[in-house]
Image (cartoon, rainbow, N blue to C red):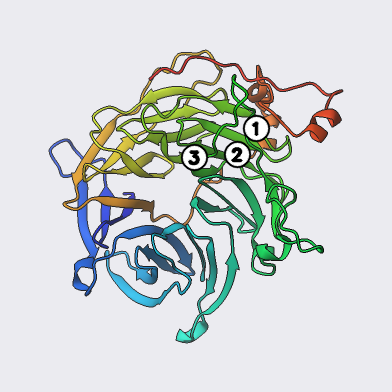
Amino acid sequence: MPRFLTGDELGNIKSVRYSPAEANETRVQLKTLHDGSTGKKKKSTSKLAFAADGDAKLLVGGYSDGSISIYTLKEDDQLDLLRSWKETRMKAEATYVGLSACHRTIYSCMSNGALRETTLGEDNAAPSHRLGALPTRLCDWRLSHNRETFAYAGDEVELSLWSTEKAFVSQPGESSIDAAGKKRKRGDQLLPGEIWRAKNVPNDSLGLRQPVHNTCLTYLYPSPQDTAQHLLAGTRLGDVRRYDTRAGKRPIADWRGIGKEGGVRAVEKGFREHELFVSDQASHMFALDLRNGGIAYGYKGISGTVTALASTTTHVASVSLDRYTRIHSTFPLPDQLGQQQEQKGTVLEKVFMTSVPTVIVWDEDTQATPMTTDDAEDEGGEDVWDGMKNVGESDDEEEAREDKPKRKVARKPHKT
């Protein structure tokens, strides 16, 4: 029975359990774990993160007032407050764009670039904190599966990959001014702790620069190399861009118009190979094939913008502005490109949440490990690159690759 945890605009935390029982039985159980209306000031839940600490399960909530609370989550759907603190560097209109927990260490990032690492002390000792500073106007932040790197992107902020450890050692401001006292352009060199930064796509047909409006991102297949990652970002223009840090700074694939209205709102990697879930600012939610960017199938019956997704090994859950939490079915993608998708995902159950849910996570700490890119190549994964071409790369990298075969992307019309 999967258990999902949701946060809403009033600061409530609720449990949603789904059980594929008989048709006449209740398959969804909803329970309020934390009542956010009891405080003096109303605060919405911006982010949730789940972690396992030995036999204990921890749930971390980041709120719109800059506070973070850590709870012990019990099997009987009880939450016990363990620790809480407030981000002292919060500014007006800032909000949490990233929150991640691993064992007893919590990472948080705000839209104004305030980065924090918090390690819980033993035997109720006070937690220790390390601070870092990132660029402002961030829209999303993600920590890698092994915690060695993190990535962010935002409004006029290109997708960037950082070393987690170095981010708390050096401050970005140290490299912003050269020895002569002249301010350097941000694109001249990487910031301290920064490993890789994406480059904007080429100018449009009129020769005009295309604006950078990244709205969300996610890690794809984990890589054996610390500095080589597969990343994906959604944009306000509705595009989904895939990056391979070994292949250059520009996206290796730029799938246009995936977000039908208002741009891409959320992306989440599925547990199956090549599987990605995407929602836009309207009421569309799709399963995307990462081999060619084609839409495998769409989910019908959603009447509000899907703001957050949580993927499991068997299902995907979503929360939307129409105040519903939905449990969706998922099906494997065809083994080969061009084959028809026989089975398509549907909405299995939905539950009305009273207040607008803002975020959702799955409570399982033991997750299936996605197949790595190297594993995919060993099993015929070269098909992933069939018909692909580089959307663009830096001049130096392009010259270095003149004698190498180029990857090509087969562009096909997207169908729901």
Is residue 35 shown to the viewer in this render? no
Task: Give the mark, 1 or 3, whose residue is nearer the N terminus.
Answer: 3
Number of on-image labels? 3
Q: Position of residue 229 (x, y in %)?
A: 66, 44
Residue drawn at x 19%, y 72% is 38
Residue drawn at x 64%, y 50% is 161
Residue indicated by mark 3:
271
Q: State yes or no: discs 2 and 3 in contact (Cβ < 8 Å).
A: no
Residue 74 in which image quadrant:
bottom left
- Closer to the camera in the image, 289 or 395: 395
Q: Position of residue 131 (x, y in %)?
A: 58, 71
Q: State yes or no: discs 2 and 1 in contact (Cβ < 8 Å).
A: yes
- Closer to the camera in the image, 354 or 125: 354
Residue drawn at x 41%, y 33% is 263
Q: Position of residue 295 (x, y in %)?
A: 44, 23
Residue indicated by mark 1:
376
Cα distance in 3D space between marks 2 and 3? 9 Å
In the displayed structure, does residue 374 sit left or right of residue 332?
right
* Three-letter amino acid code at the position of disc 3: Phe
Query: 10 Å neighbourhood of mark 1: few (<14), some, or many (≥20)?
Result: some
Q: Which mark is residue 371?
A: 2
* Three-letter amino acid code at the position of disc 2: Met
Is label 3 in a helix, a strand or a loop? loop
Residue 363 in which image quadrant:
bottom left
Asked if 295 appears above or below 200 in the picture, the reply is above
Cα distance in 3D space between marks 1 and 3? 14 Å
Q: Position of residue 230 (x, y in %)?
A: 63, 40
